[in-house]
């Protein structure tokens, strides 16, 4: 599992994550065309716990984002205007078609805590 917090990301780490997500080096694994992808994240005490990095996905992939949190939270998938809203502790999800190419941040809406960078090719 990866455990990250917004304050732990250095400019170098951000640059490497973007380069890896864009396919410029051995970053995240690529999803197979046509296979749906599920991204899971847990928010605990203001930190993010993710089981693995987001894969690079082909355009048109169905993506499900599942978020579990110990507090109220709203998570935003930039570029696709998808949200997971939790009014208290619990789990929520959203499913969307990744039909735009690029690298899209998934973060908490109010605090900007980075959860994933989703690369769509």
Image (cartoon, rainbow, N blue to C red):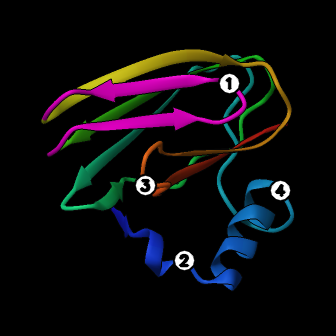
Mark 2 lies on a secondary structure that is loop
Instruction: Decide: is 27 above or below 121.
Output: below
Give the residue number, with chain letter if any, for mark 1.
80
Mark 3 lies on a secondary structure that is loop
Q: Earlier in the sequence, mark 1 or mark 3?
A: 1
Q: Position of residue 46 (x, y in %)?
A: 27, 61
Tell me, yes or no, whether the two marked residues, 2 and 3, touch with CB atoms within 8 Å.
no
Q: CA distance from mark 1 to mark 3?
A: 19 Å
In the image, is 65 to the left or to the right of 44? right
Range covered by the magenta-colored residues: 70-88
Q: Position of residue 71 (x, y in %)?
A: 17, 44
Q: Earlier in the sequence, mark 2 or mark 4?
A: 2
Which residue is more in the foreground, 17 or 55?
17
Mark 4 lies on a secondary structure that is loop
In the image, is 65 to the left or to the right of 43? right
> Residue shown at 30%/39% (left/top)?
73
Q: Position of residue 57 (x, y in %)?
A: 72, 35
Give the residue number, with chain letter if any, for mark 4.
23
In the image, is 48 to the left or to the right of 56? left
Q: Position of residue 58 (x, y in %)?
A: 78, 29
Query: Mark 1 or mark 4: which is in front?
Result: 1
> Residue shown at 29%/24% (left/top)?
92
Give the residue number, with chain letter if any, for mark 3.
111
Q: CA distance from mark 1 to mark 4?
A: 21 Å
Give the residue number, with chain letter if any, for mark 2.
9
Tell me, yes or no, whether the two marked residues, 4 and 3, touch with CB atoms within 8 Å.
no
- Position of the C terminus, as image quadrant, is top right
Query: Mark 2 or mark 4: which is in front?
Result: 2
In the image, is 3 to the left or to the right of 61? left
Query: Mark 4 or mark 3: which is in front?
Result: 3
Tell me, yes or no, whether the two marked residues, 1 and 2, touch with CB atoms within 8 Å.
no
Instruction: Decide: is 103 above or below 31.
Output: below
């Amino acid at each position: 599992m990866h455990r990250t917090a917004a304050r732990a990301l250095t400019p170098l780490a951000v640059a490497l994550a973007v380069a890896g997500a864009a396919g410029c080096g051995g970053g995240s694994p690529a999803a197979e065309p046509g296979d749906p992808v599920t991204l899971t994240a847990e928010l605990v005490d203001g930190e993010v716990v993710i089981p693995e990095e987001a894969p690079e996905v082909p355009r048109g992939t169905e993506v499900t984002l599942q978020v579990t949190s110990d507090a109220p939270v709203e998570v935003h998938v930039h570029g696709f205007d998808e949200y997971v809203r939790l009014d208290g502790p619990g789990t929520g999800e959203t499913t969307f078609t990744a039909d735009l190419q690029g690298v899209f941040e998934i973060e908490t809406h109010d605090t900007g805590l980075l959860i994933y960078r989703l690369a769509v090719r």
